[in-house]
Amino acid sequence: MSTPKIGIIMGSKSDLSVMAEAASILEELEVPFEVTIVSAHRTPHRMMEYAEKARDRGIQVIIAGAGGAAHLPGMVASITTLPVIGVPVKSSNSIDGWDSVLSILQMPGGVPVATVALNGAKNAGILAAQIIGSTDQTVAGKLQTYKDEMREKVEEAAQKIEIMGYKGGKIGF
């Protein structure tokens, strides 16, 4: 792929199983991205350097996933003017994921972080592609195709249910 437009970062390698969903959808949409680990707590200088230099390297959107206290998305957003999408990750040290959700969602005025659902990296990837697609017609077209295919699948399922009918607590297919 060409120069990455989207940076996918996470606080720990244990977050990769969740964050891989953002990478998968961006691969499907053919939007170039990069993936790395940037811990707000264990590698703060690396985090600052990443956030400060992302725009100069061609990054247009940053997706930041973190579990537990989840400071990474907000700290990155405090350093860069790029849009940051936070992915709260339910990690082993998490309180049912709520600590991550609230740490990312409840940002102070002036430091916005777009926040998706707990473990919602796929939606973060789609949102990042939509941001890119607001000025890139090729990406916008791929997103339209993706959404059209989703709609068609639902319409096909609805048609099957309507044809086969609902029978005694079960769908007839």
Image: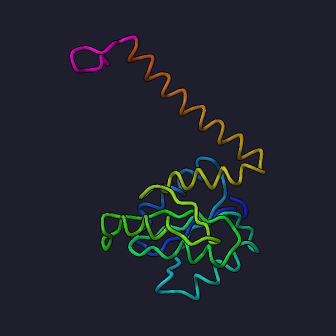
The boundaries of the magenta stretch are: 163-173
View extreme (left): residue:
168
Say which of 138 and 83 sits in front: 83
Eyeballing the image, is 48 above or below 162? below
Say which residue appears at 48% left-offset and 21% top-offset: 156
Q: Where residue 22 sits: x, y (%)?
A: 53, 56
Q: How is the image coloured?
A: rainbow
Q: Position of residue 90 (x, y in %)?
A: 36, 64
In this picture, residue 30 sits left or right of residue 66: right
Task: Give the total number of marks visible in the rendering.
Answer: 0
Picture quadrant where residue 112 is located: bottom right
Closer-to-camera residue (140/102): 102
Going by the picture, which residue comes out furthest to the front?
109
Residue 106 part of the magenta-drawn span: no
In the displayed structure image, the side of residue 108 where residue 1 appears, left or right: right
User: Residue at left 58%, top 60%?
Assistant: 114
> Please, is residue 47 above or below residue 108 in the view?
below
- Residue 29's spot in the image, x, y percent? 62, 47
Q: Quadrant of the C terminus?
A: top left
Q: Position of residue 118 (x, y in %)?
A: 42, 58
